[in-house]
Image: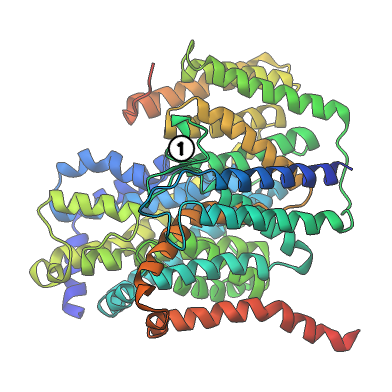
Amino acid sequence: MAYRLTLLGLLLAGLAYTWLAQQIPMDPWTAEELINARTMPTVYGALLSLTLLILLLRSIPPVAAVPAGRLVRGAGVAVLVVAFAALLGPLNLWMGLGLLLLATGWWLGERRWLPLLSLAISVPLLGFLGIELGLGVYLPD
Amino acid sequence: MLEGIATGFATAFTLANLGWVLFGCLAGTLIGMLPGLGPITAIALMIPVSYSLDPAGGLIMMAGVYYGAVFGGSTSAILINAPGVASTVATSFDGYPMARDGQGGRALAIAAYASFAGGTLGAVALMLFAGYLAGLALAFQSPEYTLLLLLALSSVVVLASPGTRLPSLVTLLIGLMLGTVGTDQLAGIPRFTFGRLDLADGLNFVLVVMATFALAEAFRMVLQDDAPASPSVSGSQLRLPLDTSRRLLPVVGRSSVIGFLTGVLPGAGATLASFFAYDVEKRMGDGSREAGVAAPEAANNAASTGSFVPLLTLGIPGSGTTAVLLGVMLSYGLQPGPRLLSDQPEIFWGVIVSMYLGNLILLALNLPLIPLLARLLNLPAPLLIPLIIGFSLVGVYLTTLNGFDLYLMLGLALLALVLRWFAFPLAPLLLGFILSGLLEENARRTLFIAEGGWSVLLERPAFVILGILILLVWLFPVWQRLRAAPRH
């Protein structure tokens, strides 16, 4: 079921992409050419939709199921990644990275504070010293 | 030529220049291992250092930086499935599974030996054939590139095992579609940007590769509770058994030739070379994981050397990295091209010899580092997974400096995770993404060339040969079916 739903989702995305390809604005200089800004996207979108249709009509390959607990853990990690991206502005890259390492490690079951804190402090510190100070890579505030 | 080679050795084998190539290799390896920083960045970061050196010393150091950065990228590709540069993506296909099975040290050692062999064979080929190959590079124009790209894309689908052809086609098309996001190169029209400036330049390569490989892999480890096996890397793991060496020798030879010839073509570069070499070994070789690591590594290093052919002999940079190097040469007042060899042989041959030297130093430098690097995989999963996630996110942020890209990356990683869960191969997605822009651009230029009639294209020998090759690749499944028919 999940396999067919995935294929169906991809098919819808492929059709939407093909429709969007037809909406690409054209300029008068390239519109008449055999390959213009719409051509390749239309070909890719149509081919993808066709291939997915064929796959939908075929038998379903065996797929391993994911336990619900693990899905929750995965969703939690995704939330932490979103939080990291959202906190880049208020904090900065290195402080955000430290928090991300700490929170993700804890969420995944690491309860020993020494290795957790060592990782969360040493990696951002090395990044700051090596990349920002050492190599002089500019990071926006 | 022998006189030239002697001049090159005399230039490179001074104490100062040996020191600079050693420094270049070390700096390149360390920078290449950092997330999001590849050879172009490494060379760009070393430009201020090169200004304080004489032209020969500066260029010799840069050759070391180049090779070091390519090898550094392979290290992160093998250990945590995070290839920071396109040319090391193919290495991760078999290198990372080896690391997961506790053979990270072995994979890194094979990568180091294969890189050395590929780079060295490339340097020898450069010495012997640079002049002749410059002509070949010039013969390759948009029509030939279009067919070469079609050959690469066709091979990845048609030569896959029969059960994975359609899934490969799906991921290839998704990659090609992702490559169309952004401003159209020829007409300047925005496509699939939804009015967002963040998407105007298209999706960044580092973003796509880190999302589909590193971040998706971290999520897979979370869902499957499947951390890599702890490796214990001893000195013996770094010494390849005689039968393995014997088996890998022809792989390295074939891949180096493929890599060097592909690298010579301006624009094709190390990425295409590594994919081609990997594909050839998987389809026609013994298909082992060792060969899967050795082939792309030998090919990308040989291609890096090959890309110096159009730069040194024609003054045409064949890749982004050699374009930066061209800038360095111009800043020294050197004009690469046909006259470089006659006017400043010590520079021409010095750079070529330093490539050989750089490979030798890189091998000596990296082998002792391998046990230290492989220890990274000893970390328990709750510490290793956050490290992979942090590494990939920082890599993308350092490349684009745009927080929006991190959301995009998460979305792509989840898509890649779902595709992988249902056994869709992800390599075609990356190949499609990398080649999408090139294919469209060259196909359009081919149409301009063919404006006088399609017969013009048939007068180009390389075009015809590539056309026949594509036809043969497409006929391969038919031949396979015919061969299997009597058994049924």
Position in image of residue B413 (x %, y %): 64, 37
Q: Residue furthest top?
A: A90
Task: Identify the residue at image location x=79%, y=45%.
Answer: A8
Residue A5 versus residue B242: which sits nearer the camera? A5
Let me know if residue B235 appears in the view.
no
To which chain does the residue with label 1 belong?
A: B
Taking the image as shown, residue B454 lies to the left or right of residue A86, namely left
Image quadrant in which the C terminus of chain A is located: top left
Spot occupied by residue A10 in the image (x, y as percentages of width and height): 72, 45
Task: Write down the residue under mark 1.
Answer: B34
Which one is nearer the viewer's eye here, B375 or B50? B50
Judging depth in this view, the residue of B291 and B429 nearest the camera is: B429
Give me the residue at 25% from left, 52% from top.
B325
Q: Is residue B396 left or right of residue B453?
A: right
Q: Amino acid at mark 1?
A: Leu
Query: Where on the picture, by quarter, is residue B463?
Result: bottom left
Quadrant (top left/top right/bottom left/bottom right) for the N terminus of chain A: top right
Q: Is residue B7 left or right of residue A61?
A: left
Q: Is residue B436 above or below residue B313?
A: above
